[in-house]
Image (spheres, grey):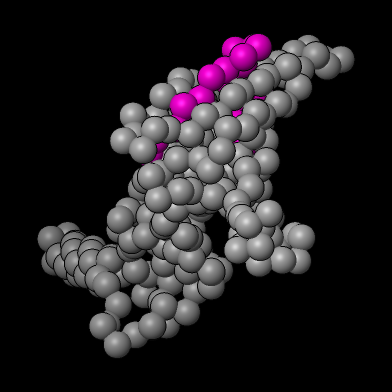
Amino acid sequence: SLVTMAPLALSSRMMNTTRAAAAHSARLPAPRGAALSRVSFSSRQSFMMGPPVPVRGTTGAPVVASRRGVAAMARQGGRGGRGRNDDFEEQVVQVQRVTKVCKGGNTLSFRATVVVGNRKGSVGVGVAKAKEVVVAVEKAIRRAKKDLIRVPITRNGSVPHETKGRFKAGKVVLCPSTPGGFGVVAGGSPRVVLELAGYRNVSCKQVGCSNVLTNAKACIEGLKSLKTFEGVAKERGISVEELIGN
């Protein structure tokens, strides 16, 4: 009986050794010269820095991509060719829980208000809803980048002239600073809008409601109404010297 069982034990041990070697070789990375033909990952996993994602290479062996690599691919735009513009900064102003009354009951979702700007004269406000906070913030960032506006900034880092902005029940008053400058004198969401737009010396007064989204939109409307000598001269079809002389 010992003679008949010895070959069986030897064969089972050899099979286990072969399986372990195959599993170890499958975990090895691909050669340096081999290019990755297909890369598939979940944007949600990359945003939340989830576990490593297996990637299939040209050699057929699976390659394990690190979390840092997946996050880098997400920043570069995923599988698309267009990358993400790193000049813009995003700041979440408000995240609220909202409910919608349906036939089966109340549906809970989240509303995110985000301000995007590059501190060089471009700024935008985006609002989006989703069932998850992360998804709502991502949608709000995309909408804010679609609604970017260009605003004029003086050498002193202020607005060219005094103006008012109004959106629904919200109203703000923007005033330029003195030649010496006094910083950004504002509060709430208008302060975030002005700082991400690139203003260093400006005063903003909120008149009316205290809603975060309404005041941010009112500040955007006020910035849209700003005019410069070059812009007015171009609209009238005359030179700046003629405009100032008149």
Q: Is residue 118 visible?
A: no
| Residue in the foreground of this view, choosing between 199 and 46 | 199
Q: Quadrant location of the C terminus? A: bottom right
**What is the x, y in percent for residue 3?**
13, 66
Residue positioned 53% across, 72% down in the render = 81
Seen in the picture, residue 243 relative to 102 is either above or below; the reply is below
**What is the x, y in percent for residue 163?**
62, 32
Query: Given the current orientation, which residue lies at the most extreme right position?
Result: 103
Q: Is residue 172 visible?
A: yes
| Residue in the foreground of this view, choosing between 236 and 19 | 236
**What is the x, y in percent for residue 161?**
56, 38
Seen in the picture, residue 54 relative to 120 is either above or below; the reply is below
Q: Quadrant location of the N terminus? A: bottom left
- Image position of 38 (left or right of 214): left
Residue positioned 67% across, 41% down in the render = 225
- Image position of 72 (left or right of 226): left
The boundaries of the magenta stretch are 200-220
Membership of 209 in magenta stretch: yes
User: Which image quadrant is residue 33 in?
Assistant: bottom left
Membership of 204 in magenta stretch: yes
User: Which image quadrant is residue 113 in?
Assistant: top right
**What is the x, y in percent for residue 41?**
49, 58
| Residue in the foreground of this view, choosing between 8 and 123 | 123
